[in-house]
Image (cartoon, grey):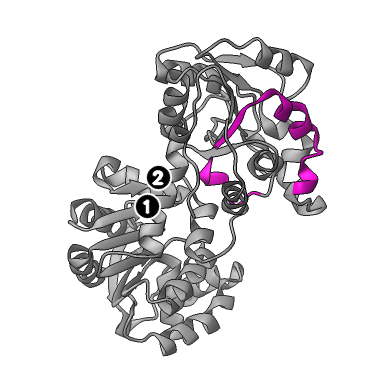
Amino acid sequence: MRIPRIDDFDLYGKRVLLRVDINSPIDRSTRAIVDDNRLTKSLPTIRDLAAAGARLVLIAHQGDTLDYHNLVSLRGHASRLGDLLGRSVRFIDDVAGPAARQAVRDLGIGEILLLENLRFLTEEVSTFESAVKLTPTEMVETYLVRSLAPLFDLYVNDAFAAAHRNAPSMVAFQEVLPTAGGRLLMEEIDALSSVAEHPARPCLFLLGGLKISDAFGMMRKVLADGIADEVLTAGITGQIMLMAGGIRLGEPSERFIADRSLDAFVPEAVALLEQFPDHIRVPRDVAYDQDGTRREMAVADLPAPAAIVDIGEVTIDAYRQSIAGAATIFVNGPAGVYESAVGDRGTRELWTAVAAARGVSVIGGGDTVASARRFVDLDHIGFVSTGGGALIRYLSGQRLPLLEAMRRAAERPAML
């Protein structure tokens, strides 16, 4: 799929609507942004559009009804973007009403305006998406699209992290406006397609963490399609694989897994081990927390008397060797309870190995990036995706509403 890029258009003097994803963690007490990674990632597209003379309007979301403590105004985001860009970013406390529309009309060449939080509109919250289920064509009649679309010459999407959202701001403007992909969106697609479609060999997937539905969704896809040459399992994913092999983990760990209904993944793990026995690596030893002290135990000696919190030293060494020899490395999820001094060794050592590896590394997901940032310089990682759910769905072969909308737009002739 060839998505038009912003360089394909004459932008000078044109009104450009740019959908970014600058949804950021918010401090509950101060309501201030505590991590501006996504704002920083959005800068190249914003800077280039403004430099080309576009009259640039940004739309974005922050928080949700299911994420209420992060549902705040974007006024602080405008201020932070201005600091990062070294120039003024105007803000108006209106999403698509008369004040917002007039501010769009009044915008000068090269000026930048951020409209208020999209999630202040019912049409843009996740519960509306799940309950109403509009098609992109039907979304053209939503308040947001019919209010803003007539004011613009071009719609640009740079919000890969929200690519799994079927919301008007993500998939409906493409129905009525010439459309282009922003710098970040195209970088995300290029990086992830290099993993999902034509990875350099050998291709290694390191899957850990607690969100094992993500790991299992990817694992079957990348193994069945021959994408992954080797899958290293750690975290709860690794523990589920051990259970699938008939290993008793110990009552504390098994209770933790059962209480969260994660044991439902054991049959899938059994099937994967039977189908791909030469491609899946499971832990050979583990670490458990004995009253605040790290203890290690070979898998053959399990069950453990306390909760398993990490992979052990033998597994760490074996996984390090695989990482060092890989040409493509994809990581999702930490190896253990990395927030704890008892459980952080595996995560620290494997991130150090990924950062030092000669192969191309790609990582993504909130907990994955947070754990990597804790132990290594992210500049030493090949590509850090802004996506969490979008990234997992892409690599699991699931549909992404944004990419489908961009594909439809690309198939229509659209010239400014």
Q: Residues within 10 Å of mark 2 (few under 14, many from 20)?
A: some
Tag 1, which secondary structure? helix
Q: Position of residue 141 (x, y in %)?
A: 82, 39
Q: Tag 2: residue type? A: Glu
Q: Tag 1: residue type? A: Ala
The vertical placement of 251 against 19, above or below, is below
Q: Residue at x 54, y 54 (%)?
A: 389
Q: Residues within 10 Å of mark 1 (few under 14, many from 20)?
A: some
- Look at the image and tell me whether residue 238 can be seen: yes
Image quarter hosting the C terminus: top right
Q: Position of residue 329 (x, y in %)?
A: 30, 61
Q: Is residue 24 left or right of residue 242?
A: right
Q: Is residue 157 magenta?
A: yes
Tag 2, which secondary structure? helix
Q: Which residues are drawn in magenta?
A: 137-165
Q: Residue at x 22, y 52 (%)?
A: 352
Residues under numbered marks 2 and 1 in contact, where contact means CB atoms less than 8 Å apart: yes
Q: Position of residue 345 (x, y in %)?
A: 27, 57
Q: Is residue 412 magenta?
A: no
Which residue is disc 1 drawn over?
191
- Look at the image and tell me whether residue 291 can be seen: no
Residue nearer the viewer, 364 or 157:
157
The residues bearing labels 2 and 1 have C-alpha atoms spaced at a distance of: 6 Å
Which label sits on residue 187? Answer: 2
Q: Position of residue 209 (x, y in %)?
A: 44, 60
